[in-house]
Amino acid sequence: MRKSRMLMISFLGAGLFACGPTEKAQTYSSDLIIKGRIYTGREDFPIASEVIISDGFIRAVVPDPIIYDEADTYDEESLLALVTVSPDAEEIKLGEAIAFPGFTDAHAHLDGIGFRELTLNLEGTSSVEELKSRVAEEVGETTPGDVIYGRGWIETGWPEGRFPNRYDLDEAAPDNPVILGRADGHAAVVNSRAIELSGITDETPDPSGGAIERDENGVATGILIDNAENLVRGLIATPSPERRKEALQKGAEVYAAYGWTGVHSMSVNQADTELLIQLEEEGRLPIRVYNSLTPAGLDDLAETGFWEMNDGKLTTRAIKFYVDGALGSRGALLKEPYADQQKTRGLQLITKEQAVGAYRKALANDIQVTTHAIGDRGNTLVLDWYEEVLADHDGDPRWRIEHAQVIDPADIPRFAALGVIASMQPSHAIGDLHFAPARLGDERLRGAYAWRSLTDAGAVIAGGSDAPVERGDPMIEFYAAVGRTDLAGFQGANWHPEEALSRAEALAIFTKNPAYAAFMENRLGTIEVGKKADFTVLSADIMTIPVEQIPDVKAVMTIVDGKVVYDARKQ
């Protein structure tokens, strides 16, 4: 790079250094300069050596001279920007670290991520016995009668080979109501005290969209599926606004430390948007948040219109619906019975009339629709309903299906044909591979976690984690997308390794594609002039290191709007 006080950067044919296609040449004074190996996320210009930033925007991108002829970057006739290299500008020399466009989690639950840190966290519980032990430890820190609430258990791989039940929890906590949510958020196990206090009896009917699991004698086992969880929800004290605000801030801080620069937060309570506004106004929201509200927020959002503040730092534009439950708890809606439980095909949580009516209202008010669908029947229903509502619409609504885990292969081309975004979480595939074959059987695996098939069919995949269902680490998600094996390298028979993505494609689903899915592709997703200065800086080059090393890579720095919001060196 030329060592002069005034640095002139040119157009270089593709607009890499332009201030924007309609902007005139301007002079900017830099306040941040990043030097080192920088992946831009652009196919035509993938690697840069320097980025110059001012006022939260990228003002210049300098090619890597080893890859590009430096002389090509100085075409005086196509000069579009003048950047004053300020002597006061902060300079970040990456060294061995590598910079990428800011990673965005396209599907997570920000409040849940925070509450996971503030309540009984059952992640990593390895057996029923360990679950009982952790509950017993919690009992020792409470008084008799206090409700014990936790989340994060998942029975996959447990030596007992079964779900926990009420009697397990009774041993650990006979006097305290206990409610423990499964990691997927679609099932809970409760003890006898919680069953008694909530009024559940052997004669209590299954609620619509839910199931009370019972043994062969018709006695409730303590497992509540989907809407049946609501039967005990009244036992859990409603968190105060102050507590919810604490959880939202904690979730955002955890995500900044992972290297995420943004999150699409799903099933957001409308009241929490006000808390997020407060956090942003107070300077305590380190990352971008794109909200998808619960259906209860549809009327108000339709009346007031979607909104954003601070140039996309905080946006509310979408509504999230559910058509079915989760595969692990057999709530996902399938076309044929579960292979390992022939009496059920899962649960349908919304009727066509309810869905289509809400979808039409959202469309009329330019509100993005996102719908949770996991089973093949669930995905077909949502695609059918979208197709019906969008039949005469010529706009670009960018409606989404969240998860799209098990798809009838005949439906895969419909995503691109309808312009439906597949919002998928790669880590589900490397966790579910331990039980999904038993649930689905080999034939249905052909359309399961079908990232390659969807990509080849022209669909846009927005990658996420579904935290706190999963850990929420972007490196685990990236690894899952390109490796399609669990963290120990196991894949199993008939898990379709051909559905893995290339590293460039994996990078896109966590950078460029989430920006598109949030209508922000002109501001976010790639490193180019005129876009917001969001960067994820990692400890190693995930584009070249052996796949098995990717999960060990850590965030070194997270930069949002040109400001360092997380720096591992200062922790």
Image (cartoon, rainbow, N blue to C red):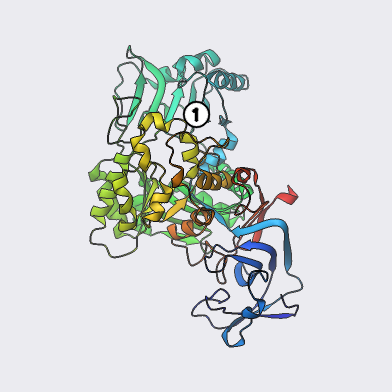
Residue 316 in picture, x, y percent from top left = 44, 55
Q: Is residue 168 above or below residue 310?
A: above
Q: Residue at x 52, y 20 (%)?
A: 159
Of residues 353 and 13, the one drawn nearer to the viewer in this rendering: 13
Q: Is residue 219 above or below residue 441?
A: above
Q: Which residue is mark 1?
A: 154
Mark yes or no: residue 8 visible.
yes
Q: Is residue 561 above or below residue 235?
A: below
Counting labels gives 1
Q: Residue at x 29, y 40 (%)?
A: 377
Q: Residue at x 22, y 45 (%)?
A: 353
Residue 21 in picture, x, y percent from top left = 49, 78
Of residues 197 and 399, the one drawn nearer to the viewer in this rendering: 399
Mark yes or no: residue 234 visible.
no
The local secondary structure at tag 1 comes to loop
Task: Assess disc 1: are there few (<14), some (14-19) or many (≥20) residues with their C-alpha within 10 Å of its C-alpha.
Answer: many
Residue 333 in picture, x, y percent from top left = 32, 36
Residue type of the residue flagged with mark 1: Ile
Query: Which quadrant holds residue 387?
Result: bottom left
Query: Which quadrant holds residue 417?
Result: bottom left
Q: Residue at x 53, y 57 (%)?
A: 504
Q: Is residue 61 above or below residue 155?
A: below
Residue 484 in picture, x, y percent from top left = 50, 42
Q: Residue furthest top?
A: 217
Q: Residue furthest bottom?
A: 77
Instruction: Give left or right: position of 440 versus 13.
Output: left
Instruction: Give left or right: position of 217 versus 49.
Output: left
The N terminus lies in which quarter of the figure? bottom right
